[in-house]
């Protein structure tokens, strides 16, 4: 991840670099994001070398990780925040990725706002803007899913959107897509990389993001529910589940983000396999 800029909150308390604001209305990238993420979603519903679906491979990996990092069983390096609360059974995951569920348009809301943390040794600033909601769902591209809820986000070295996509335009059957575009350093004019995501909502405070080579389990802990200051935790797994010789990496990572730029908990690497 590229080096992060110094934290400078604007008058509205925003973290987006001013040069990135123009990307919010970049229709080409918005549409490309949903198209690329939709292609990846369809791939997840197809067989892999070892599973009936890519979704099944993801569910098995998360289950294996949960078992091997269960509190009291002493993984090679223990998690600061356990991940046992996530319910990622294959049936639940495939139903949501297919769009069989009725997800709330508030699905991203627990992560709204500015967050400060570390990724490896680098200070990282995140900002999740309040979602735009559309009723009826809004069509943004021909022959692509319409959008019920759309959130713009800054991830420290890039920007992107989280999409709550309505299957066949029906808000009662929806699913989560995402796209992140990355920059190199402080050059916010040229996109150097892109990464489509497919999401899974496990209740109002937990999201899982699946990419071609990572799985991120993200959980928000609002003060109103825990009594502790707001924070959220990202647990990241690397994988090669969709190749000819599927494999997973034995090292996972965990990062904790808070609302306070002076409170950036240490980044953790976990040897779990």
Image (tube, helix red, strand yellow):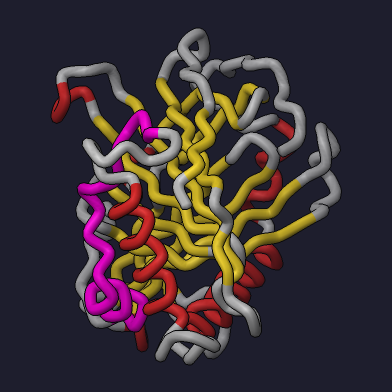
- In the figure, residue 238 lies in which quadrant? bottom right
State the residue lying farthest toward the top.
262
- Figure check: 204 above or below 54: above
- Where does the image place residue 189, in percent across and percent down from the top left? 84, 45
Identify the residue at horizontal 48%, vertical 85% (top origin).
50
Q: Is residue 197 shown left or right of residue 150? A: right
Q: Nearer the viewer, residue 174 or 43?
A: 43
Give the quadrant of the N terminus. top right
Q: Is residue 44 shown left or right of residue 164? A: right
Task: Report the span colored magenta.
Answer: 78-99
- In the figure, residue 125 lies in which quadrant? top right
Q: Is residue 47 shown left or right of residue 27? A: left
Identify the residue at horizontal 63%, vertical 22% (top origin).
123
- Where does the image place residue 134, in percent across and percent down from the top left? 35, 64
**Magenta-drawn stretch contains 231:** no
Identify the residue at horizontal 60%, vertical 69% (top origin).
240
- Where does the image place residue 156, in percent across and percent down from the top left? 64, 35
**Magenta-drawn stretch contains 81:** yes
- Where does the image place residue 26, in percent across and percent down from the top left? 68, 57
- Figure check: 165 above or below 235: below
Q: Nearer the viewer, residue 37 or 134?
A: 37
Identify the residue at horizontal 63%, vertical 16% (top origin).
7
Q: Nearer the viewer, residue 273 or 186?
A: 273
């Amino acid at each position: 991840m590229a080096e992060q800029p110094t934290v400078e909150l604007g008058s509205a308390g925003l973290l987006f670099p001013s040069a990135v604001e123009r990307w919010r209305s970049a229709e080409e990238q918005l549409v490309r994001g949903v198209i690329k993420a939709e292609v990846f979603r369809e791939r997840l519903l197809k067989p892999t070398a070892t599973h009936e679906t890519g979704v099944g491979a993801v569910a098995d990996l998360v289950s294996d990780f949960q078992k091997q990092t269960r509190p009291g069983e002493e993984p090679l390096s223990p998690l600061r925040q356990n991940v046992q609360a996530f319910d990622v059974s294959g049936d639940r995951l495939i139903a949501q990725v297919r769009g069989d569920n009725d997800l709330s348009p508030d699905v991203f809301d627990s992560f709204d706002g500015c967050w400060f943390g570390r990724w490896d040794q680098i200070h990282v600033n995140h900002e999740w803007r309040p979602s735009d909601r559309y009723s009826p769902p809004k069509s943004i591209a021909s022959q692509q899913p319409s959008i019920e809820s759309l959130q713009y986000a800054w991830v420290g070295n890039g920007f992107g959107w989280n999409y709550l996509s309505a299957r066949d335009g029906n808000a009662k059957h929806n699913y989560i897509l995402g796209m992140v575009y990355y920059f190199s350093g402080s050059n916010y004019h040229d996109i150097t990389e892109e990464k489509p995501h497919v999401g899974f909502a496990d209740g109002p405070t937990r999201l899982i993001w699946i990419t071609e080579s990572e799985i991120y389990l993200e959980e928000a802990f609002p003060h109103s529910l825990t009594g502790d200051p707001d924070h959220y935790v990202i647990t990241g797994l690397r994988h090669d589940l969709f190749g000819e010789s599927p494999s997973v990496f034995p090292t996972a990572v965990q990062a904790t983000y808070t609302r306070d730029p002076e409170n950036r908990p240490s980044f953790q690497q976990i040897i779990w396999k």
